[in-house]
Image (tube, grey):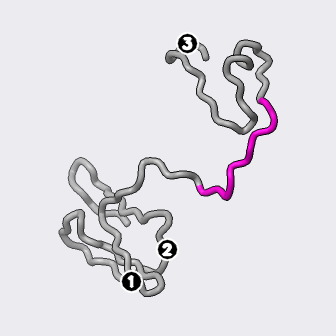
Amino acid sequence: GVIYENGLFKQHFVMVHPNASGRVKEILPAGKYVIETNVIEIEEGGKVTGVQMFQKWPVREARPVVEKLQGCTALLTCERVIDALFPVTQGGTAAVPGAFGCGK
């Protein structure tokens, strides 16, 4: 949903956590509410969950995977220094150190 906030922020988006599911049981009518007020109630299996105008979500959340596969093939760049100092498997994650704008 979208709520008018103030002159600086005209639209305040009410977001539902990605893992939330169920049917919307109640939506509050237009009015003045504080951010801790449950503006939407979601019901799933007899359990009622409130959705507020602010969200507390973790900054980092692991991606949903069944298992992480072991790398078996090297990523070759054909640059001896890079391949020797920073070996990486195909599909793996790498970080190359260096300053910004130095042509890494």
* Marks 1 & 3, CB-CB < 8 Å contact: no
Disc number for residue 54: none
Task: Say which quadrant the C terminus sits in.
Answer: top right
Q: Is residue 39 above or below residue 72?
A: below
Q: Hey, which quadrant is residue 27 in on the image? A: bottom left
Residue 71 is situated, as x and y percent measured from the top left of the image, at 75, 39
Q: For residue 2, what is the image quadrant?
A: bottom left
Say whether residue 92 is left or right of residue 9. right
Quickly name the residue at label 1. 25
Residue 102's label in the rendered image is: 3
Q: Is residue 23 left or right of residue 48?
A: right
Q: At 36% across and 63% down in the image, what residue appears?
A: 14
Observer-side mark, 1 or 2, equals: 2
Residue 21's disc is 2
> What's the distance in space between the residues labelled 2 and 3, CA to CA?
47 Å
Start and end of the magenta stretch?
Answer: 64-74
- Using the image as rendered, state which of residue 6 and residue 88 is in the foreground: 88
Residue 75 rendering spot, x and y as whole percentages: 77, 29
* Left or right of 71, for residue 104: left
Query: Which tag, 2 or 3, sits closer to the chain's start?
Result: 2
SS for dot 1? strand
Tell me the SS state at disc 3: loop
Relative to 103, is 33 on the left or the right?
left
Gap in angstroms between the C-alphas marked 1 and 2: 12 Å
- As for residue 90 lying within the magenta part, the answer is no
Give the residue type at disc 2.
Answer: Ser
Whether tag 1 and tag 2 are in contact, CB under 8 A, the answer is no
Of the residues shown, which amino acid type is indicated by label 1?
Lys
